[in-house]
Amino acid sequence: MHLRNRAGMAWVILRACVRSPATVPFLIVAWTLGLGALAPMASGADMTIAVVKAPGTDEANAFYVGNKAPLLPSPLIKLPIGNVEAQGWLRHQLELAADGMTGHLHELSPWCKIEGNAWVSKTGQGERGWEELPYWLKGFFDLGVLLKDERILAEARRWIDGVLGGQRPDGYFGSEENRKNHDLWPNMAMLYALRSFHEATGDERVIPFMTKYCRWMATLPLEHFLPGSWQKWRAGDNLDSIHWLYNRTGEAWLLDLARVNHERTADWSGGIPTWHGVNLGQCFREPGQFYQQAKDIRYLKAAERNYDAFIGTYGQVPGGLFGSDENCREGFVGPRQGTETCTMVEIMHSFEVLAKITGDPLWLDRCEEVAFNSLPAAMTPDLKGLHYLTAPDQVSLDRANKSPMIQNGGDMFSYTPYEQFRCCQHNVAFGWPYYVEHLWMATPGNGLAAVLYAASRVKAKVGDGTEVAITETTDYPFDETVELKIAAPKAVSFPLLLRVPRWCEGIKVQVNGQDTTIHAEPPVWIELRRTWKDGDMVRLVLPTKIGVTVWKKNRNSVSVSRGPLTYSLRIGERWQKYDTGRPWPGFEVFPTTPWNYGLIVDVNNPAGSFEVVKRGGTLPDQPFAPDLAPIMLKAKGKRVPQWKQETNGLVGELQKGPVRSGEPVEDITLVPMGGARLRIAAFPQIGEGPDASDWMSAAASHVNPGDTVSALNDGMEPKNSGDAGVLRFTWWPHKGTTEWVEYTFAGPRRVSWCDVYWYDDAGGCRLPASWKVLYRDGDAWKEVANPSAYATKKDGYNRVTFNAVTSAQWRIEAALQPDGSAGILEWRVGE
């Protein structure tokens, strides 16, 4: 039912304003622009519907702990752990985790062995007292609570009892080695586990324990409080726990400690102090946390600015993340750059925290984007292993070294349950549990909000204190329908808020069979206020459509989405075991089908380029597997033969599109990106005509295994000839030989000049003794006619001009010095 006149709209706005003055500005805008549809919906029902940007904070919540004055009130309030129970595919993720690596890490990881561990020592002596154990424990305990798994809870309780029993008289707990180094970072992670334990059990030891520890922190000399390194960057986690404790005790001195904590934290308010990937995902939010106390909007804007800064440069790719393997590096911005699994779970939590602080549903959209499109592929489908780095384009998960194209050397891609990737191995444990805990949240006015959609059941006190249960039935994100059924012992009035994601158009809400259409510009919340009765039903339809993103900052690559899911090319996978002598094997994954496709797509009419194919039947327990994909897209593409893997197996760098291809059109299948362990999710777009480019492949007589021919035309401008911050090509260790590098274009190209930026590290690689330019003429290589001088200078381009000639293949031939090799940082050709 719609209101069809402005007088009716005005009546509803007035009524809503009386209930919630915080909604006044938005409702007036909604009235003026026609963005809101508000109406009583069922005959005799006392209901209003409001479209709001965030839950209003003028009313308190009498039953759950939000921010205590003078902190800004909380638009969204986390329910105690255990109030939300996951069902469907999401519960199965928890079950897989319990049966998999996380649930058995105390059997697999030496850092999770309780014997001799410093975390449970009454004197802080012992081994392995740093971040690994609390990383795991804060997810492991929550996992046990959410599943009611007695085995997990018993093991977690051993650790928590040991930590609580190990507090020293002055309030410090944990490793004495950390105390000696003035390192509070590991304790910050452990406080999260203790907080969950208190929420789940009400254990009376936790609040005094944390209070005593905070008193100890408050006595530290400033030079010893967060002096540097991880703790200084990550002290937003400490601030979160200080505020958590204040909200339960109201002791004003904790706010003084919180202020000092902020002042001693790295200056995230003034910029980005570290480009380490996990730190970015974990710490960018810190000014937004302090905003609750400072009440200065500039702090919240600083957190938003931080996010925009790293996403705007390194996150111009699908999947919701950014290239930081392990640090963001200038020029390394393409979809083959990976993200640590640690970063995934930490940035999801940052989004959850900022959503609580602001009520802004955009943070929740971002959380879903990572959860659905990136996190699942970081682990094996059975959750018995993970890898360090996951990238949007990743076509071989082998153990070969990918450095320096990937920053760290060694095996960064294969799956293993062991300590090879030990930070991620432990830290991944809290990703899905925390996500489940934030599916539903309390709101001011004793209401409830459906925050992250998934099949679930929530129990909470609402309205006058009546405890209701809401069962959410949905296959989201693989389906667009969400049904909520309310169970209540008596009729109770409270607001129910429903999140409208940013990609959604034309949301439909039905209450007890009565339809309405909400006109709203997402992302927003729909607030339903009425007296709810046992058996009431709410049906929410979030219409999905196919969208295409053109990543202009990443060579015009394109990605395809439908609702919250992004899609990837379906690539055949061959899983090969290793570590077979250990209880749980590791796996490499290799492609069995072609992967180097460009996408044929009309970016102005994306729906016309794809056919949606639904598998049918019930949703698989594990939908994030390519062979069980519930929804697929049929598409058209062409192979790009010049797009190849590097010699070390890394997918070749993208080149500027649209690109031409002379290959035939083929039918290709796209599957949800989160289920694709081998993936091409950022595609070159196939084009024709003058706006399309030829894909240029490169080859060489020899390539050092640590270097790449991709460096020749990656567009990364060197600062000097010894620049170690850009990719390079070298012939190392060849010396005194005649070598070549070669470009092959998709078709003949007319060329009259060539620029070369030589690599010279003043060591083993020096400028060549001489060089020349050749082109392919039939079966022969010929030198260009009338070349200008072949210069060999450092720290700049060396240009040679010659009579224009047309050819599809071009070479530089270089004579190396007798005692030195040589290399190239960039090679450009043109007419």
Image: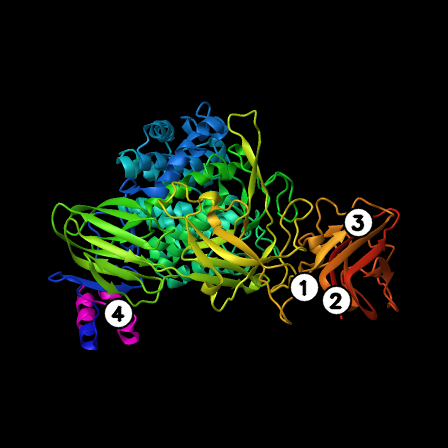
Q: Residue at x 54, y 37 (%)?
A: 415
Mark-to-mark CA distance, 1 and 3: 23 Å
Mark 3 vs mark 2: which is more N-terminal? 3
Marks 3 & 4, CB-CB < 8 Å contact: no
Disc 2 designates what residue?
Answer: 749
**Regarding mark 3 in the picture, which secondary structure is present there?**
loop
Q: Mark 1 highlights which residue? A: 694
Circle 4 crowding by C-alpha within 10 Å: few under 14, some 14–19, many from 20: many
Kind of element beneath mark 1:
loop
Q: Between residues 155 and 147, which one lies in front from this camera angle?
A: 147
Q: Residue furthest top?
A: 115
Q: CA distance from mark 2 to mark 4?
A: 60 Å
The span picked out in magenta is 11-39
Quadrant assignment for the C terminus? bottom right
Residue 793 x, y percent position in the rendering: 82, 61
Q: Amino acid at mark 1?
A: Asp
Q: Which residue is mark 4?
A: 27
Q: Give the residue pinned by disc 3.
A: 701
Q: Nearer the viewer, residue 63 or 292?
A: 63
Which residue appears at 27% of the width and 48% of the height? 472
Residue type at mark 3? Ser
Question: In the displayed structure, would residue 223 be above or below residue 42?
Answer: above
In the image, residue 660 lies at what x, y percent?
64, 64
Type of amino acid at the residue the image marks with label 2? Arg
User: Which amino acid, mark 4?
Assistant: Leu
User: Nearer the viewer's eye, disc 2 or disc 4?
Assistant: 2
User: Which is the main secondary structure of the residues drawn in magenta?
Assistant: helix
Q: Is residue 8 magenta?
A: no
